[in-house]
Amino acid sequence: MNHTLCVGIDVAKLSNHVYALNFNRNKLLSVNIPNTQDGANLIETHILKLLDKHHLSKVIVILESTGVYSGHLATYLSASKFLSVFDIRVYLINPKISKNYRKSFADMDKTDPKDAYILAEIVDISQFESNDALAKYAGITWRKNQSGKFTADETYMTKTGNKYLRYFLIQAANMARIHMPEYHDFYQKKYDEVTTHQHKRALALTARKLIRLIYGLLSTNRLYK
């Protein structure tokens, strides 16, 4: 069982929308709070109550980097003596990251709760104990009664995980096979192994290979060379 609370905060000049969920993506809180010192205190209180109520021991808070509006709140939460007893991490991310991720939620209206939800979705790699766990979360896995080498033409992904993350990983794999020789060769090898569903199959397997690379780099804090 994962004991992490994920908190996304959509920061604006007058108010902050706070969206909290657990590792299983169950909504625990969605509330609009004034962007004031009293509001920062209230956000701290909400987080503490959720940690206690749901028996969680770690909290990840993500805000877009919006200058003075987000900087004060991020500093306040990261320096909180009450939250310091928990394993707390506060991240300010480039708005381009959340903007690109937001594009996969095209069926959702543009709202502050939506933006806060998306920020809460962007969690760190330490929540996954292995690349297999990350692949399972994204739904890029295959049933155990099927070939682990994916030799059958009609073998399907489970697709039971996060469909938005799966979409981005598939798109990333497509770019990797175009621009990276190693992934181009791997894709072509898998493409040539079967006679049906060649592109979808090869791309899915390339995405699975890419997950191993992504997990390895992020979990060891290394850059790709």
Image: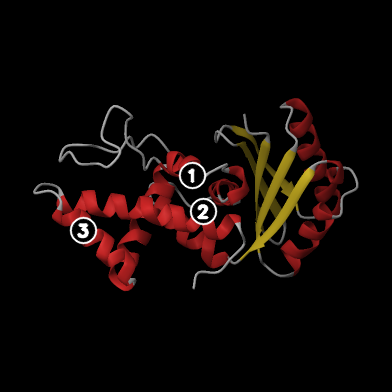
Measure how far apart labels 3 and 1 are at the Cα level.
24 Å
Residue 19 can be seen, yes or no? yes
**Would residue 20 appear left or right of 134 to someone viewing this image?**
right
**Image x and y of residue 204, in percent:** 29, 50
**Would residue 191 appear left or right of 117 to someone viewing this image?**
left
Tell me the SS state at disc 1: helix
Tell me the SS state at disc 2: helix
**Which residue is located at x 35 percent, y 53 percent?**
207
Mark closest to the chain's N terminus, 1 or 2? 1
**Image x and y of residue 106, in percent:** 39, 51
Tell me the SS state at disc 3: helix
User: Please, what is the three-letter code of the amino acid marked with disc 3?
Assistant: Lys
Q: Are marks 1 and 2 in contact (CB under 8 Å)?
A: yes
User: Please, what is the three-letter code of the amino acid marked with disc 2?
Assistant: Tyr
User: Please, what is the three-letter code of the amino acid marked with disc 1?
Assistant: Leu
Q: Are marks 2 and 3 in contact (CB under 8 Å)?
A: no
The mark closer to the camera, 3 or 1, is 3
